[in-house]
Structures are given as structure tokens and as C-alpha cells.
Amino acid sequence: MMMSKPDGAASKSLGPLLLAACLILLISNGARSSWGLFLPEMTQARGWSRETFSLAVAVQNIMWGIGATFFGAMADRLGAMRTLMLGSLLYVAGFLGMAYATTGVMLGLTGGVLVGLGIGGTAFGVVFAAVGKLVAPERRTFVFGLGTAAGSFGQFLFLPATAEFIASTGWQGAIFAHGLAVAAIVVIALAIRGDREAGARAGGTSTMGEALKEALGDRSFHLLFWGYFVCGLQVVFIGLHLPAYLKDQGGVTANLGAGAIAIVGLFNVIGSLSSGWLGQRYSKKWLLAVIYVLRSLVMIVFLMLPLSTWSVYLFAASMGLLWLSTVPLTNGLVGQIYGVRHLGMLGGVIFLGHQIGSFLGAWLGGKIFDMTGSYDLAWAGIIAFGAFAAVMHAPINERALGARASALRGAS
């Protein structure tokens, strides 16, 4: 059952809460978006292979998925404010350790485990778990789109700033700057209040265990999981390996990769807001299916065209419109089907599928390159998975579980 519209007091406090939520997502998503710029710098400085760095980022993405599930449950039970503070501290600790990592194992423990858990405690899952409980159902998907757009704008801001920091202070200086920015989340999180009480008032299954059992017994939950898996596979491969792919091709400027990922972030602001708006009016599952098909088509066209600065920028802009536009729709479907009382936990479980895909996109991209000397096979794989994701979304039942149960009782 969906919660009712917020009361007057809650409505008055919604503006500052949404502002804080958007700032947190801007910082959290922006700070994690620049790993592709660190890849060539750190591997050269430390004498690591690309697989070593890619494996650390892959571990980071898995830990982010595990952390999103754990911290989502924590936010449902204790509130998002405490959860965000803890996540921010772990995030900062990971950056500090990463700056001094001299082995692949150290990089995996700091930039992988600690940063991954920190992202899990400060990213979309925890923030959306709070906001989703406090906004009216008819506004929820659009607000998720607004938050996703803020995260995308963070990517746009952080990429050129990171490139400039690396050029002027070195990669270690850029990492310290990231840690300082993330530390600000501890203060901003003070504005995220009232979600725990709103969740307690919401209808739905009473315990986390019952809610998880109920969701796992629904086929649509599994389809959402594997559809989101493809999202992670595609975006992390492109975000991490596109700068190196472009550098390998030659004949392009040194900062083209950073510029391309920044453009992805800028155009994703438009894509996220649009998907949030469309998700309030049309079937979310079919919108998701279309997004995955379009992603694959954009990649095919990019690889077929002669490589140039303009082809890269057109690819980045087109992919940006489709980049995180899946996030408000997927989270909107979870809230629509399973309710918001345990949105943090259930959204976290679905997001774990995204991060399993992210692990493979990061690691296999580097592994395939080291084995074959090119990214060709990796591109082919992520293109094919776009069609798989579209097929996964088609059978999803978008009706709320409670409404389905009531219909069955009425028919009996």
C-alpha cells in the first residue's frame, strides 16, 4: 500500500530536504565518476596492469552493491541521516588509504572495499529510501529523476575538475580533494530528517524478513534485478574504460576522455529529468526496455563511425540521455510494486544486481584488453546485453502486490 500525501508540516520542510538530498547525490556520484581518469595515471605510477586497477574498481562496485543493501536496511530502521554520516566517513577513509596504496591488494582494500561501502551509504539507494517515504506517490518518480539529475550534474562538475587537479597537483592531490568534498556529506546529512517516522506510518509488510520473502517470491523482482544488472555492466564499462579506449586509438586530444564522460553527465541531467517525468505518465517497464535498446544502438553507431572529436562528443551526449535514466524508473517500480516501507532494503537488493554487472563491466573490460590487446570483444558483449535487458523488462507486472492479492481474493 502506498503512503498518503505528506501533511502540511512535511510539505513545508520538503524543500530543504530535497536540496540536501540533491547536494549529497551530486557529491557522492561526482566523486565516484572519475576513476577512468585515475586508471592511466595510477597504473603508470605504481607499475600495475590495467586488470589490477580494474579489479579494484570491480571490488568497489560489488561492495557498493552489498553496502547499498545493508545501508538501505539501516536507513529503513534508523533513518537516513545516521546512515549517510557513516557512509561518508567510510568513503573518506577509502580515499585517504587509496592515495597511499602501493600494491594491488592495498588498492582493493581502500579504493575497493572502503570506497565501495562508502558509496553504498551515500548514493541513490539511501537518499531515495528517505525521499521516497516523504513525497506523495504521484510525485515520487519525478523526484527520483531530480535526484538522479543532481548526481549526473556532479559527474559533469567533477570530471573536468579532476582532470585539472591531476594536471596541476598530481593524482594524489586529486584524490585528497575528492576526500575533502565527500566529508561535507556529514554536515549536509543533518537536513535529512523524518523519513524513519514516515516509513513507520506507511502501509505494507511489517518486518524486513517478510518483505524480502514476499519480494523474492515475485517474478517481477527477479526480472528487475537482472535488468539492472545490464545497466551496471554497460555504464561502468564505458565510464571506466572509455578514456583509455580513446587514448589507445591515438589522434585525439589527451583530455577527450574526461570531456566525453563530463558530457555524459551533463546530458544525463536532461535524461534523468525526462525519464522521471515520463515515468509519472507512461509504463515504466516499457520505458526501461526502450532505454536499453537505444543504448545498444548508440554504441553500434559510435563504433561504426570514424573516430573523431565530434563522434566522441555525439556519442557522449546520446549515451548521456540514456545513462542513469534507468535509476528513477527502476526505483519508481520498486516503490510502486512493493511499497515504500522497506524501500531502502528492497531497492538495495535490486541495486546489488546493478553492481554485479558493474563488477563484470569494470574487471572484464580490463581483463579482455590485457588478453586481446583491444576492447572489441567487450564492446560486443555490452551491446548484446542491451537486448537481454529489454527482454527482461517486458514480462514485469507493474501492479502493486497488495492490489494483486486483493484481486485474487475478490475472484475467489
Image (tube, rainbow, N blue to C red):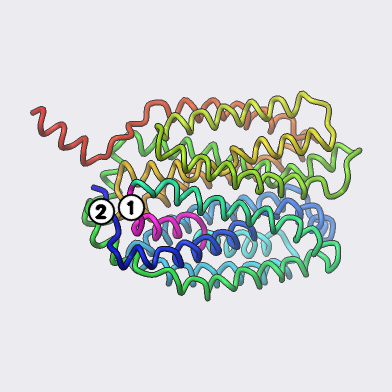
Left or right: residue 11 compared with residue 246: left
Given the image, on which type of amino acid does mark 2 rest? Ser
Where's the C terminus, which quadrant? Answer: top left
Measuring from the top left, give residue 295's x and y in whole percent.
61, 31
**Residue 197 marker:** none
Q: Which residue is mark 2?
A: 4
Measuring from the top left, give residue 89's x and y in whole percent.
55, 72
Q: In this view of the protein, which residue sits in the foreground, 290 or 16?
A: 16
Q: Earlier in the sequence, mark 1 or mark 2?
A: 2
Left or right: residue 312 compared with residue 380: right
Does the magenta-highlighted stretch encompass residue 124?
A: yes
Q: What is the distance, in whole Å, between disc 1 and disc 2 at their CAs?
A: 6 Å
Answer above or below: position of 34 versus 358.
below
The magenta stretch spans which residues?
122-137
Q: In this view of the protein, which residue sits in the foreground, 123 or 348?
A: 123
Left or right: residue 68 compared with residue 334: right
Q: Secondary structure at mark 1?
A: loop
Give me the residue at 63% from left, 54% from top. 153
**Residue 136 marker:** 1
Give me the residue at 78% from left, 46% from top. 257
Measuring from the top left, give residue 101's x and y in whole percent.
72, 67
Marks 1/2 in contact by CB < 8 Å: the verdict is: yes
